[in-house]
Image (cartoon, grey):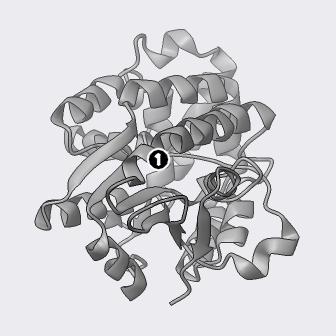
Amino acid sequence: MKNLIKTVVAFAILISVSGQAQTKTMALNNSLLWEVSGKGLKKPSYLYGTIHMICGNDYFLSDKTKKAFAASDNLFLEVNLSDPNEMAAAQQMAYGKEPLSTTLSPEQLNDLDALLQKRTGMTVKQVDKFSLMTVMSLIMMKSFGCVDIKSYEMEFMAMAKDSNKSVTGFETIQAQMDFLSKAYSDAEMITMLQESNDDTGKKMVQNYIQENLPELYKDITAPKIMNEKSRKWMLDVRNKNWVVKMPEMMKDKSTFFAVGAAHLLGEQGVINLLRKSGYTVKPIMN
């Protein structure tokens, strides 16, 4: 259980959601990799949309992405899990401040217990000391139906280490947990888990493999996954914060930014915000 929880925590802090895609732009956006140039940049930087969990058999990294990563000087992620302090903080946050049995209502405990038994074979008593976010991530991981689960963020960090690239994060673990707590109440989190199913995850993975960013964006932003409040705290606020930091990171070096794919599109998405700031952002198709 201890090793499983460590794995779950790594994914728990990388869950993100987004807003609605514009239908008229779908044909132009079928790429996970984007080049950022212009506005005085000495070198182009790259923006890559990740999916935070994927079965090993489905994992892929295109040649264009490998080439862009090799051409970059450093790596920027949502959270830098290569920092031992951040990983230690994440593991500590896996445990709730109070047991779930005291923070959830009897009805919520029953609902969560039913979900756990159906999706993982576990009971709520077995996870009572963990945070609801950790339990949510455990359920999501089990729904993939495979043992070998990969994370693009983890893979990129390993690649950065091998090529002596620096790794930096936009946010701390604590900041991301604060955004999550503002985005979802306990009741909303449980309802989201109730309304999701294995087919939802499979559809997302297929769209990801096809680099169909607009459809993936729509999958992640379905009403059963997010509402206006979660959009504000999980996307709009965070995207704006990131775009403020990116110019300094790109000024003298080519930076490879890898963030959840759902952050890329939309009116308040990173691509549109960068364009509004004067940068040229274009998809790399091959």
Residue at image point 43% right, 14% down: 99
Residue at image point 83% right, 64% down: 22
Q: Between residues 251 and 209, which one lies in front from this camera angle?
A: 251
Snapshot quadrant of residue 115:
top right
Q: Between residues 12 and 113, which one lies in front from this camera angle?
A: 12
**Residue behind mark 1:** 246
Residue 76 located left or right of residue 275: left
Counting from the top left corner in percent of width and height, residue 49 is at 51, 63
Residue at image point 58% right, 33% down: 112
State whether residue 279 appears in this view: yes
**Would you place residue 46 above or below residue 26 in this image?**
above
Dividing the image into 4 quarters, which one contains the N terminus?
Answer: top left
Counting from the top left corner in percent of width and height, residue 156 is at 29, 63
Local packing at callout 1 (Cα closer than 10 Å; few below 14, some 14-19, many 20+) is: some
Residue 210 located left or right of residue 134: right
Q: Which amino acid does label 1 sit on?
A: Met
Residue 217 located left or right of residue 239: right
User: For the view shown, which residue lies furthest in the bottom direction?
Assistant: 286
As helix, strand or loop, the secondary structure at mark 1 comes to helix
Q: Between residues 50 and 126, which one lies in front from this camera angle?
A: 50
Q: Between residues 109 and 177, which one lies in front from this camera angle?
A: 177
Counting from the top left corner in percent of width and height, residue 203 is at 65, 72
